[in-house]
Amino acid sequence: MKIDDSAIVGGRQILTWKIGERLFGMDIGHCREVDKDKVIVAVPHSRKEIAGIVNLRGDVVTVIDLRVLLGGEVLREDDDGKSVIIRLKCRNQHVALKADSIYDVLSVTNDQFEGTPAHLSEIEARYIQSVAMTPKGLVVILNPDEILRGAS
């Protein structure tokens, strides 16, 4: 599914997805496309947060496992092989995030955003930009720049 962000008027549009029971999101302007049922090929000797690589529309894309990147133990993996891939928009890299399922695209107003919680670990604080209090629940908003920096 190709993501079209041309119709955004007012507020921020957040693409949300689930990993375990936690709801994560990112401004839709940073997301290029969502794919499911793709085979992720493991890369020997890669860093532990790299789930592998996948072929998306002729590009070899590095897939980051957010469970591991954000602490692994906190987000237990129940991998049933039915994950989705969220490809990020970036100029010099081909990077995607691995999630359990896509949740929704939410319109979030500025007053729904809160700063980064104080209790986060150093690693979590690096990758989490803010949280949003929405009618669908608490959404952890990721920092795309730090995720891309961590992938390189």
Image (cartoon, rainbow, N blue to C red):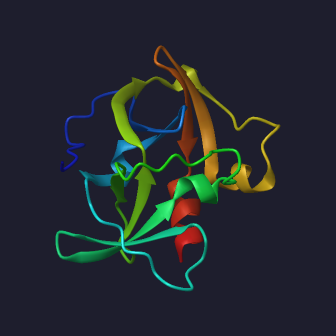
- Work out whether 114 lies above or below 31: above
Position of residue 23 measured from the top left corner of the image (x, y, whole percent): 51, 33
Residue at 59% across / 69% down in the picture?
150
Position of residue 140 measured from the top left corner of the image (x, y, whole percent): 57, 36
- Left/right of residue 9 with respect to residue 116 in the rendered view: left
- Left/right of residue 89 with respect to residue 128 in the rendered view: left
The residue at the far top in this view is: 135
- Left/right of residue 108 with respect to residue 66 in the rendered view: left
Position of residue 36 measured from the top left corner of the image (x, y, whole percent): 26, 51
Residue at 37% across / 32% down in the picture?
103
- Left/right of residue 128 with respect to residue 137 in the rendered view: right
Residue at 24% across / 76% down in the picture?
59
- Work out whether 132 lies above or below 125: above
Q: Quadrant of residue 39?
A: bottom left
Total count of labels: 0
Q: Quadrant of residue 141?
A: top right
- Work out whether 118 lies above or below 97: above
- Work out whether 136 lies above or below 47: above
Position of residue 100 measured from the top left corner of the image (x, y, whole percent): 42, 44
Q: Quadrant of residue 60?
A: bottom left
